[in-house]
Amino acid sequence: MNADELRAIQAPLKQLYRDQPQAALVPARAEGSLDPNNVAIVVDAWHGKVTAGLHKAGGGSGELACSADMLLEALVGCAGVTLRAVATAMGVTVRGGKVIAEGLWDARGTLGVDRATPVGLTEITVRFEVDCDADQAKLERMIQTTERYCVILQTLKSPPKIAMEIA
């Protein structure tokens, strides 16, 4: 896809969202089924099911998906797609590359060993290794624009209001 093709696809959507802002509100949903025999949940993923369980640091076997890794995978997916769209719009040829997200969490927090220790990822680094025809300045603009428009990255940087409910 080139920049003109991307603009042609997105132009009517942008106009619709300008004319009808409510049409731009996109619901997102995830669902999983609790495993009655294990400390795990089977998550309905895009093309199949993923069983998430305790990380080895929390007493798991290490054979099941880690939720923190799944969060980073979502970040990599969103940042990668956003980067490709930005590069396409800027007319930059991307020959290949990688997006790598790395995080750090302290098991003392989630296991309740130390109440002062935060629960959750406390550091995340996203690294872009891009093989493209852009010079350094243009590549930096691409990364800045990717950061601005990546849904998952912006969600992590400005967390949404979250409500917990019991059905």
Image (tube, rainbow, N blue to C red):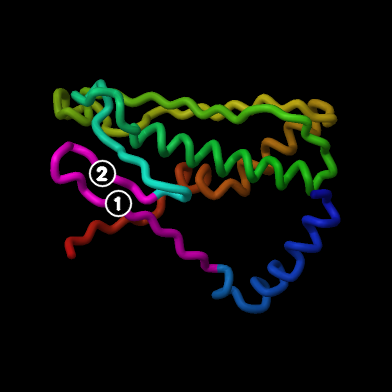
Amino acid on which the number 1 mark rests in the picture: Gly
x, y (%) of residue 142? Answer: 73, 38
Of marks 2 and 1, which one's residue comes earlier in the chain? Answer: 1
Question: What residue did someone put label 1 on?
Answer: 32
Question: Which region is colored magenta?
Answer: 25-44
Residue 78 - label: none
Which residue is rendered at x = 82% and y = 36% of the image?
Answer: 93
For the residues bearing labels 2 and 1, Cβ distance under 8 angstroms = yes
Amino acid, disc 2: Ile
- The residue at which mark 2 appears reads as 41
Secondary element type, mark 1: strand
Using the image, determine if residue 33 lies above or below residue 87: below
In the image: residue 70, left or right of residue 119: right
- Residue 78, how many percent across, how many down? 56, 44
Q: Residue at x 76, y 66 (%)?
A: 11
144 vs 124: above or below = below
